[in-house]
């Protein structure tokens, strides 16, 4: 799994995840979610956590290949019956106010031959069963972090022309670059990066915007209304306990929540989306008064259809994220087939649940209150990429002034 990677770099990666990512505090518990194939790196994360005086580390194992085996052999009634111990594992993190760190390494093609109905129904069942945990994450009640490491299958998908070992080594190299681990002082680099994104968030938060208008040459012409008291956030969010953390690493985005009823027009995805182990390609949506009125996809249509039909909220948007075309991940000119990376190479939107923290004092409000203020509610939250090198985004303020936010794919400020 590690190829010829220097072990010190792996510990530096773990150090970033623990100190910048979840920002683990002394005497705090850490819960790690990892595939069984990632056991060695999970142990490095655990070792680093103990170095920082973790009270306790728990590893929550998953096995994607076994999950596929279940999908191929069990009936749907069994598959949607989520065991109580899995629910308890996630709720444990909430109840103990533990930091939560998830290691991703999935094969983008693993579930391509599994019925879209099975994928949709099991995903929905998990979202319902794990609702307490997901709500705590969305509200920043707990500090959480997603990172990724290569698997052979993922590396070969990204670099099909290379031999397995070479593909894994190259993917490690690219991950290290996106994580700024190729710099002399990665932690200092991340702190500077956080401040840069915060500066842009503050500019937009003080602009008194009421809507954003997107337009590019591939067919996107979309207007997105914002709720009153919207907040753009950059990396370096604050949990409810006031301690900062970075949820996604790498990250290049600043993001907010749209008003769920104020989205109109057409948007075309600029990259494939890997969802539930299936690639959705050449797709787009038409919105009317916030709701998806039509959609299309050349590949993965049924999977996309099932996603949209998860619940009423999955017909609406929950996130608006801005990412420069000229960014470290995009400049690698590589499609990662992994949303954690691809969403940070492109402006994106998300179908489904909105983050309460994207509204002033939103984390202290009930779901009903947030809904009444315009934020979307759903079991899903799925990002899809829309950024291009010619994307133009114009903001309209409450007093009808026009503000150029993006010009030729990049921030205008």
Image (cartoon, rainbow, N blue to C red):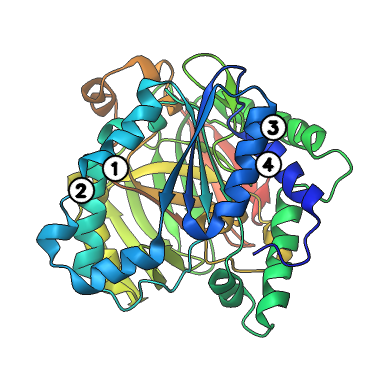
- For residue 120, above or below residue 54: below
Q: In this orientation, which residue lies closer to the viewer: 326 or 136?
A: 136
Task: Point out the tag, 1 or 4, that comes first from the N-terminus.
Answer: 4
The reply to whether discs 1 and 3 touch (Cβ–Cβ < 8 Å) is: no
Q: CA distance from mark 4 to mark 3?
A: 18 Å
According to the picture, the residue beneath numbered tag 3 turns out to be 194
> Where's the N terminus, which quadrant?
bottom right
The reply to whether discs 2 and 1 touch (Cβ–Cβ < 8 Å) is: yes
Q: Nearer the viewer, mark 2 or mark 3?
A: 2
Residue 383 visible in rendering: yes
Q: Around disc 1, counting alpha carbons within 10 Å, would you say few (fewer than 14), some (14 to 19), or many (20 or more)?
A: some
The reply to whether discs 2 and 3 touch (Cβ–Cβ < 8 Å) is: no
According to the picture, the residue beneath numbered tag 4 turns out to be 14
- Residue at disc 3, secondary structure: helix
According to the picture, the residue beneath numbered tag 1 turns out to be 86
Give residue 118's mark: none
According to the picture, the residue beneath numbered tag 2 turns out to be 82
């Amino acid at each position: 799994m590690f190829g010829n990677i220097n072990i010190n770099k792996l510990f530096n990666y773990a150090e970033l995840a623990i100190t910048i990512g979840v920002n683990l505090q002394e005497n705090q518990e850490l819960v790690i979610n990892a595939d069984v194939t990632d056991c060695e790196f999970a142990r490095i994360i655990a070792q680093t956590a103990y170095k920082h005086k973790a009270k306790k580390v728990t590893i929550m194992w998953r096995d994607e290949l076994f999950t596929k085996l279940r999908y191929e052999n069990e009936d749907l009634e069994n598959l949607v019956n989520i065991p109580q111990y899995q629910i308890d594992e996630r709720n444990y993190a909430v109840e103990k106010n533990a930091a939560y760190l998830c290691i991703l390494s999935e094969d983008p093609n693993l579930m391509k031959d599994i019925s879209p109905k099975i994928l949709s129904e099991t995903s929905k069942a998990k979202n319902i069963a794990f609702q307490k945990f997901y709500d705590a994450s969305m509200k920043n009640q707990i500090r959480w972090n997603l990172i990724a490491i290569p698997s052979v299958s993922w590396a070969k998908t990204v670099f099909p022309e290379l031999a397995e070992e070479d593909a894994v080594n190259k993917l490690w190299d690219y991950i290290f670059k996106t994580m700024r681990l190729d710099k002399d002082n990665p932690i200092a680099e991340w702190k500077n990066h956080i401040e840069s994104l915060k500066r842009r968030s503050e500019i937009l938060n003080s602009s008194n915007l009421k809507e954003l208008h997107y337009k590019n040459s591939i067919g996107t012409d979309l207007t997105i209304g914002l709720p009153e008291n919207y907040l753009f956030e950059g990396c370096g969010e604050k949990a409810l306990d006031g301690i900062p953390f970075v949820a996604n690493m790498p990250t290049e985005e600043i993001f907010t929540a749209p008003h769920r009823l104020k989205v109109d027009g057409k948007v075309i995805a600029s990259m494939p989306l890997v969802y539930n182990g299936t690639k959705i390609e050449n797709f787009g949506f038409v919105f009317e008064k916030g709701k998806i009125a039509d959609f299309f996809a050349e590949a993965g249509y049924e999977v996309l259809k099932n996603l949209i039909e998860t619940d009423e909220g999955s017909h609406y948007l929950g996130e608006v994220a801005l990412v420069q075309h000229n960014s470290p991940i995009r400049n690698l000119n590589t499609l990662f087939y992994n949303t954690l990376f691809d969403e940070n190479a492109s402006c994106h939107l998300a179908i489904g649940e909105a983050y309460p923290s994207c509204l002033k004092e939103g984390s202290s409000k009930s779901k009903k209150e947030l809904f009444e203020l315009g934020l979307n509610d759903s079991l899903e939250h799925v990002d899809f990429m829309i950024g291009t090198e010619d994307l133009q985004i114009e903001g309209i303020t409450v007093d009808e002034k026009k503000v150029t936010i993006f010009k030729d794919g990049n921030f205008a400020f």
